Amino acid sequence: MKYKAFLFDMNGTMIDDMQYHIKAWHHLLNELGAGISMERMKEECYGKNNELLERIFPGRFSEEEKHTMSWEKERQYQESFRPYLKLLDGLPGLLEKARQQGIKMAIGSAAIMFNIDFVLDELQVRPYFDALISADEVKRSKPDPETFLSCAASLGVDPANCLVFEDSPKGVEAAANAGMDCMVITTLHDPADFAGQKNIIGFMKDYTSFAW
């Protein structure tokens, strides 16, 4: 295998939880009067929480207010998703095989560290990862390449030798902007949603079909 590092987005990529994020946002934003559909909410679920709130309500809330709403959304998300929290099929075996083969691994997510800790500690998979880059560690969200370039730098691996696992078009674009190949997990989006993105090496519904 030519790749020396695997970089994982988390939500929708390691765990099938994006519908829970979408529903939590949909409930919270419509309580605030957004009048937003579930389909648009699906499209808006990328980037940092404060950025999402600013896209929906430009100029309406202070940073402190957005921070408070963000925490409330994450509380709702964790409460509803915890009974269903598990890694996607095939991922536990992939993590173990990658570790045995000396492939370095990192998480590069737009989630806050609160949610990354929730997943890693509940599922007891923290030891597999050599670097964790959350929304708290970057200035620019995906599709900017900062998240994945920070992962590569933390691992000491050239970006060209990194394979990104992603579930969203914005995440695939971020990988492309970082000069990285990408494997797409189709938990939320169909292959047609990624038309024109040339760094994709394949599509998988989970990790059981990943070819080494």
Image (tube, rainbow, N blue to C red):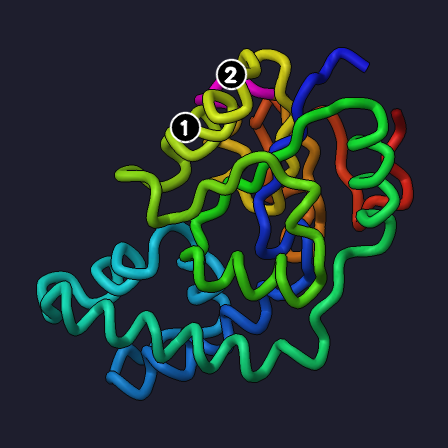
> Residue, x 28% and y 77% (percent of image)?
34
Which secondary structure class fits the magenta region best?
loop
Q: Amino acid at mark 2?
A: Gly
Packing grade of label 1 (10 A; few <14, some 14-19, many >=20) is many
| Magenta segment | 176-180
Task: Indicate whether 199 appears above or below 28.
Answer: above
Q: CA distance from mark 2 to mark 1?
A: 9 Å
Q: Which residue is pictured at 62% across the width and 77% down the height? A: 81
List x then y, in percent, for residue 149. Answer: 44, 24
Name the residue tied to disc 1: 145
Mark 2, residues whose alpha carbon is within 10 Å: few (<14), some, or many (≥20)?
Answer: some
Could you tell me which residue is drawn at 77 percent across and 23 percent down? 102
Residue 201 position within the rendered picture, expressed as x and y whole percent measured from the top left: 72, 24
Q: Secondary structure at mark 2?
A: loop
Question: Image height check: is 143 above or below 35?
Answer: above
Query: Residue 68's spot in the image, x, y percent?
Result: 24, 75
- Quadrant of the image containing the C terminus: top right
Where in the figure is residue 96, as x and y percent of width and height? 84, 40
